[in-house]
Image (tube, rainbow, N blue to C red):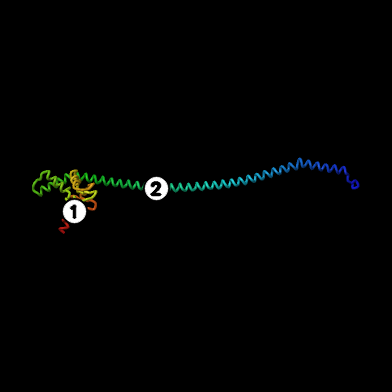
Amino acid sequence: MEGLGINIGYLLIQILGIIIILALMKAFAYEPILRTLEERKTRIAKGLEDARQASIARDNADAEAKKILDAARAEAAKQRQQGVEQAEETRKGIIRQAEEEAKQIVEEAREDAAAERNRILADLRSQVVSIAVAATNKLVKDSLDTERQHALISDFLAKPPTEVSSLTGARAVVTSALPLTDQEAARVESMLQVDEVAFRVDPSILGGLIIRVGDQVVDDSVAHQMGALRDSLA
């Protein structure tokens, strides 16, 4: 070796130094670097896994949020539809109530007008009776006693025709030219074989009674008699 110019001792020292350097590098540099790299690799892997889990969680959250939003939109649409239906029903109810109230007002006005007309006619009855009595006295050339006068007038205005006793049904409608007295109404009711009697006033019939039970009618009014007489003369 010495012939080659190599110093064995120096070579051994260099080899030993290199071994020592390698040992020191392994102990103080290589292994810490490896541990650092491994720790970094582990952190990177964990970070990637956390990112993957976060992405999954975000996707799940987005899907859940979409479900919630869709459900909220559906519920809002349902509430709007219900609101529209309720508003429409309320509108129809208000219209129905207004129509019913209008009908009631008209009916009450009609009833009030009829009651006022009947009251006026009842007030005029005494005058009509006086005129009729005076006309009767003039025709017969003699004075009638008061009782006979009132009996004639009552018969003229409210005497039921005998054929009404044959009428059958549940309800009768009696029409007279002037409002009947309680006594006259009772006499009419006693001759009718029905459960209920309603009284109406129609001055156009002039006198007598029109009695209707269902589709059965007995017309003993003066207007009817005058019409029949006019037809017979024609």
Give the position of the C terminus as an image quadrant: bottom left
Q: Is residue 233 left or right of residue 33?
A: left
Q: Residue at the location (42% across, 48% down)?
A: 85
Identify residue for label 2: 89
In the picture as drawn, the residue positioned furthest to the right comes out as: 3
- Pointer 2: residues within 10 angstroms few (<14), some, or many (20+)? few
As rendered, which of 221 and 165 lies closer to the eye? Answer: 165
Residue 121 on image: x %, y %: 20, 46
Q: Residue at the location (49% across, 48% down)?
A: 74
Amino acid on which the number 2 mark rests in the picture: Glu
Give the number of the disc on residue 196: none
Amino acid on which the number 1 mark rests in the picture: His
Q: CA distance from mark 2 to mark 1?
A: 52 Å
Identify residue for label 1: 224
As rendered, which of 26 and 175 lies closer to the eye? Answer: 26
- Pointer 1: residues within 10 angstroms few (<14), some, or many (20+)? some
Q: Are marks 2 and 1 in contact (CB under 8 Å)?
A: no
Residue 92 on image: x %, y %: 38, 48
Q: Is residue 33 left or right of residue 164?
A: right
